[in-house]
Structures are given as C-alpha cells and as structure tokens.
Amino acid sequence: MKPVGIFFVLLVLVIATANAATCTDVATTTLPNNSEAISAYECTPEQADAKPLCFVVAKISDNQYLYQTVEDSVVINSATTKTVQIVGLHAKYSTVTGDNKITSTFWPNASLLIMDHSVRKGFLSGYELQKSISYSCK
C-alpha cells in the first residue's frame, strides 16, 4: 500500500473514533431534561449480526429511576422504578409495541445484558421468543 493510502486510512480511523458518541453522550439526548444519568454502560454484542447498545440508568426524581436500552441514539426499551422488576442481582423490563415485545435483562455485577425479542403467537396466547442476544457491557 502506498504511503498516501496508509495515511488516508489512518486519518479516516481517527476521525471516526473522534466522532463516535459515547453512551454518556447518547444519554444526554435520550433522557428527560430533569434527569441525571447515574450509569451509562457501553454494551458490545456477542453475535456478529447485532449492533452495540447503551444501557442507561438515570435518576428522574426522589426514589424514581429510569432504565433505558438505546441503539443508534434511539430508545428501544425503557422502564421506570415502578415497572422494572429487580430480582436478586438483575433488573428486567419489557416494552410491547403491537405484536412485538422486547425484554432487557441486565446483571450489573456480571456486566451482562440480554435482549429477548418476542412476537405474539396469537390472540390471548402469549409471546414466542424469536431471538435472544447477549451483550458484554463496560
């Protein structure tokens, strides 16, 4: 490869790295104005066909917290303290849109996030798991 070509490739990589938004940056655009981000985790998928995610926990008022799962600066799943299930050492919440259900389960001690994508089987018959994606978070 010519020196000019190598320089161009390195320049593109530096610019891409400089423009990459961190999860803290993403949280400032997705959280309500009166909230304060407490934790923002960058989550890398273990499957090659999935995109990275941000898992954000924010304080929105006294004893009230907001949990968000964000992909490409778009909230794909969220819950408040009233709707999230804290079971043992993990937090779990679901969002239903039409016949689709997305469930986020986060284990902070293991830095693990699992996203389950389900589809309604039929009227009054529950949901069927379509895919489950694991993420390593830091």
Image (cartoon, rainbow, N blue to C red):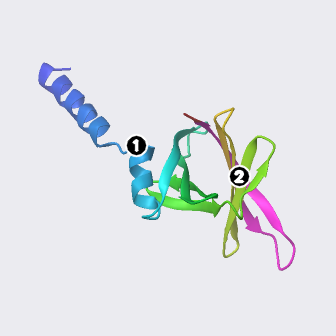
Q: Secondary structure at mark 1?
A: loop
Residue of label 2? 131
Q: Residue at x 73, y 66 (%)?
A: 119
Q: Please report the bounds of the magenta region as a residue range.
A: 118-136
Q: Point out residue 2 in the picture as x, y percentages from the top left corner.
A: 15, 20
For the point 54% across and 33% down, the residue is 138
Question: How far across and how far down the image is residue 83, in percent?
Answer: 72, 64
Among all residues in the image, which is located at the extreme right? 125
Q: Where is the N terminus found, in terms of image quarters? A: top left
Q: Residue at x 56, y 44 (%)?
A: 49
Q: Is residue 87 left or right of residue 134?
A: right
Membership of 119 in magenta stretch: yes
User: Is residue 120 on the magenta stretch?
Assistant: yes
Distance between mark 1 and mark 2 Cα atoms: 26 Å
Which residue type does callout 1 highlight? Thr
The amino acid type found where label 2 is placed reads Lys
* Viewer-nearest residue: 102 or 57: 57
Q: Is residue 53 visible?
A: no
Residue 97, located in which quarter of the rendered image? Answer: bottom right
User: Residue 59, percent across and down?
Assistant: 55, 55
Q: Is residue 57 left or right of residue 90?
A: left
Query: Which sits in the foreground, 120 or 64?
Result: 64
Q: Residue drawn 64% across and 34% down?
A: 111
Task: Give me the disc on residue 22.
Answer: 1
Say few, some or many: other residues with alpha carbon within 10 Å of mark 1 (under 14 / 14 to 19 / 20 or more).
Answer: few
Q: Please, which residue is most extreme toward the left here?
A: 4
